[in-house]
Amino acid sequence: TITSATTASVAENSVGTVYTATANESVTFSLGVSKDESLFTLVAGAISFSSAPDFESPLDGNADNVYLIDLIATDAAGNATTLEVAITVTDLDEDITGLRKVGNAISIYPNPVRNQFSLEGVELDSNSRIRLLTLDGRLAKEFHFRKDHIYDVKDLNAGTYIIVLQGDSIHQTLGKIIKEN
């Protein structure tokens, strides 16, 4: 029987274990596949986000910052028990050094994009990078910050990508782009 809690809460941008699975007998833990499980990793009962969560850009199924996963415990006899766990991401007041907003908004256009997109409304330090991640957190493409703000993506497959700004003192998710062929 699974003995760990059905809920957990974690601040945005957290890395490392966000939930620890426990049981009252020797079991093997696994994750289901029908909810938000693809955004997590499970190692020996320790559950972590595959990519640090961002409150302002939720990736859970209904974008409410409550990530649902099915935790499955299987004993030596093959008996399986499933527990639905809700992991809530909470907001932090972030002081982003290295990112300077120009005007009131950051804009990414065109979106959807075919060949290139423009990122307007931010200025970054010279060490900053723009990273495009797949929805499961894998790096798809990385750019060094460009003063012309234009980034070429014609070599990417069609799909949805997360835009992350990263540098010496910054790690901020800006939003998503949709790449079309």
Image (cartoon, helix red, strand yellow):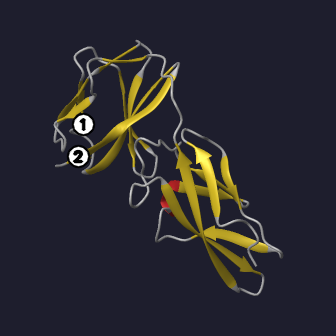
| Image location of residue 100, percent across then percent down | 37, 16
Labels 1 & 2 near each other (Cβ < 8 A): yes
Seen in the picture, residue 85 relative to 136 is either above or below; the reply is below
Q: CA distance from mark 1 to mark 2?
A: 8 Å
Q: Residue furthest right?
A: 25
* Secondary structure of the residue carrying numbered label 2: strand
Q: Which mark is residue 135?
A: none
User: At 61% across and 47% down in the image, what residue appears?
Assistant: 10
Residue at the spot of label 1? 153
Taking the image as shown, residue 5 lies to the left or right of residue 130, namely: right
Seen in the picture, residue 106 relative to 83 is either above or below; the reply is above
User: At 71% across and 85% down in the image, what residue appears?
Assistant: 78
Taking the image as shown, residue 32 lies to the left or right of residue 43, namely: left
| Image location of residue 33, percent across then percent down | 49, 70
| Image location of residue 148, percent across then percent down | 22, 16
How many numbered marks, from 0 up? 2
Quarter of the N terminus within the rendering = bottom right
Could you tell which of marks 1 and 2 lies nearer the N-terminus? Answer: 1
User: At 70% across and 78% down in the image, what residue appears?
Assistant: 74
Q: Amino acid at mark 2?
A: Lys
* Secondary structure of the residue carrying numbered label 1: loop
Q: Residues within 10 Å of mark 2 (few under 14, many from 20)?
A: many
Q: Residues within 10 Å of mark 1 (few under 14, many from 20)?
A: some
Which of the 4 quarters of the picture holds residue 102?
top left
| Image location of residue 93, percent across then percent down | 52, 31
Q: Amino acid at mark 1?
A: Val
Taking the image as shown, residue 113 lies to the left or right of residue 124, namely: left
Of circles 1 and 2, which is in front? Answer: 2
Q: Which mark is residue 179?
A: 2
Seen in the picture, residue 167 relative to 79 is either above or below; the reply is above
User: At 51% across and 28% down in the image, what residue appears?
Assistant: 94
